[in-house]
Image (tube, grey):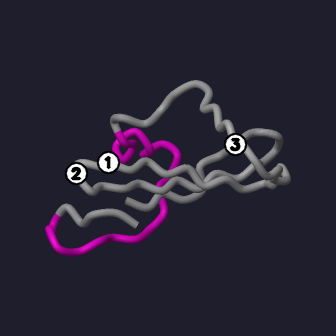
Amino acid sequence: TGPDPDDDFATMMGEIAPETWLAFAPTDMPTGQIFNIIYGPKYSGGAEKIFCLRGIANGQEMEMTFRLIGGKWKLTKLVE
């Protein structure tokens, strides 16, 4: 789900083919490794992780869902 380029007040929903990802990829998306240090309770590993980017000053938010597929983390859902 993301903003509709033809309508400022609407959103679009669909699937992005791997070869078109660069056209939709956020420009400020982290690269390389992301470290998540959690203090306190222990959590099981799990095969799905949700990563959120929030702009406190501008109110923008992006949610990325990753799944562990074939031993590698793959982006499976992007919500802006």
Q: Residue at x 60, y 32 (%)?
A: 34
Side of 42 where 29 appears, left or right? left
Residue 38: numbered disc: 3
Side of 58 where 27 appears, left or right? right
- Assess disc 2: are there few (<14), some (14-19) or many (≥20) residues with their C-alpha within 10 Å of its C-alpha: few
Identity, as a three-letter code, of the amino acid under mark 3: Ile
Q: Residue at x 75, y 39 (%)?
A: 72
In depth, the one of 21 and 61 nearer the eye is 61
Q: Position of residue 14 (x, y in %)?
A: 44, 68
Q: Position of residue 67 (x, y in %)?
A: 70, 53
Question: Which residue has dot 1 on it?
Answer: 55
- The part of the chain drawn in magenta is 6-26
| Residues at discs 1 and 2 in contact (Cβ within 8 Å) | yes
- Assess disc 1: are there few (<14), some (14-19) or many (≥20) residues with their C-alpha within 10 Å of its C-alpha: few
Question: Which residue has dot 2 on it?
Answer: 58
Identity, as a three-letter code, of the amino acid under mark 2: Asn
Would residue 80 be counted in the magenta stretch?
Answer: no
Give the residue furthest to the front.
40
Is residue 30 shown above or below 4? Answer: above
N-terminal of the pair, mark 3 or mark 2, is 3
Give the residue furthest to the top.
32
Side of 12 where 71 appears, left or right? right
Cα separation between marks 1 and 2: 5 Å
Is residue 27 shown above or below 11? Answer: above
Side of 59 where 49 appears, left or right? right
